[in-house]
Each structure stands twice: as structure tokens, then as C-alpha cells.
């Protein structure tokens, strides 16, 4: 078992592992409240990748990884995940007019 210290490396290697063998790849997460530690694990029974953190801001990163895996599992391993990872610029929504108190 390998603990990967860089989040970007963990995501990249996890996606590669899933795309290589989507039938047997598993993604698990474990949170220990008493320690405040979150451990994410991706394995295909031959290679095991782990990422451990105790930072609260990594919860958003975990949510993005969940979305990546949901996309890959539902659309297939060759699906485009650029829209999920947010690497492309999102369109700026125009401000809504007419809300608030009238003067």
C-alpha cells in the first residue's frame, strides 16, 4: 500500500487505475472522527493507492473525486472528465436583476 502525499498525483493515478481495469477497481473512504483523519483508497487487487489527510478543506477535493468516479462509472472509462474536474473555465453567470428591496 502506497500513501501518496500529493492530491493531484493521487487523482491522476486513481483515474489511470480505474481506466485500466474498471470491472475490479474499488474506491473507498474511511473517516475517523476521534482522530479527524480521512483516508481515501483506490485498489484493483494488484495495486493499492491511498491518500490520508486531516485538513477540512480537503473535503471539497474528495467531493470532486467522487464526481469524477461517478462520471467514469456511469458514462464509461473513456468518458471526458474535464467538465467535472473544472479545468475548463466556467461561464460567468450574469447577475440577476430585480431582487432586493425597492427604493
Image (cartoon, rainbow, N blue to C red):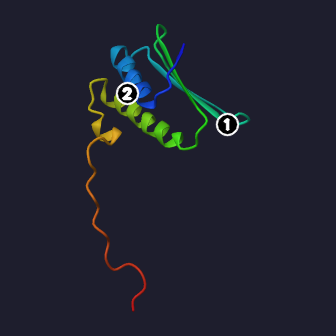
Q: Residue 76 location in percent, x, y?
A: 31, 25
Q: Which residue is mark 1?
A: 36
Q: Residue 67, located in which quarter of the rendered image? A: top left
**Would you call the spot at circle 1 few (<14 residues within 10 Å), some (14-19), or many (20 or more)?**
few
Q: Which residue is mark 2?
A: 73
- Residue at the spot x=35%, y=20% of the render? 16
Which numbered disc covers residue 23? none
- Residue at the spot x=37%, y=25% of the render? 12
- Residue at the spot x=26%, y=32% of the render? 80
- Residue at the spot x=43%, y=39% of the render? 64
Q: Residue 40 location in percent, x, y?
A: 54, 27
Q: Cα distance, mark 2 to mark 1?
A: 29 Å
Precedes in sequence: disc 2 or disc 1: 1
**Does residue 92 sit above or below 65 in this rendering?**
below
Q: Residue 56 location in percent, x, y?
A: 58, 43
Q: Residue 13 location in percent, x, y?
A: 39, 21
Task: Report the quarter where the N terminus lies.
Answer: top right
Which residue in the rendered view is the most extreme toward the front? 5
Q: Give the structural element (helix, strand or loop) at label 2.
A: helix
Amino acid at each position: 500500500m502506497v500513501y501518496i502525499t500529493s492530491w493531484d498525483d493521487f487523482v491522476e493515478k486513481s483515474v489511470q487505475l480505474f481506466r485500466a481495469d474498471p470491472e475490479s477497481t474499488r474506491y473507498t473512504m474511511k473517516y475517523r472522527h476521534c482522530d479527524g483523519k480521512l483516508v481515501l483508497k483506490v485498489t484493483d487487487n494488484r495495486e493499492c493507492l491511498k491518500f490520508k489527510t486531516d485538513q477540512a478543506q480537503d473535503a471539497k477535493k474528495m467531493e470532486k473525486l467522487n464526481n469524477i468516479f461517478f462520471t467514469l462509472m456511469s458514462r464509461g472509462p473513456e468518458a471526458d472528465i474535464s467538465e467535472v474536474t473544472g479545468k475548463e473555465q466556467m461561464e460567468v453567470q450574469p447577475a440577476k436583476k430585480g431582487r432586493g428591496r425597492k427604493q
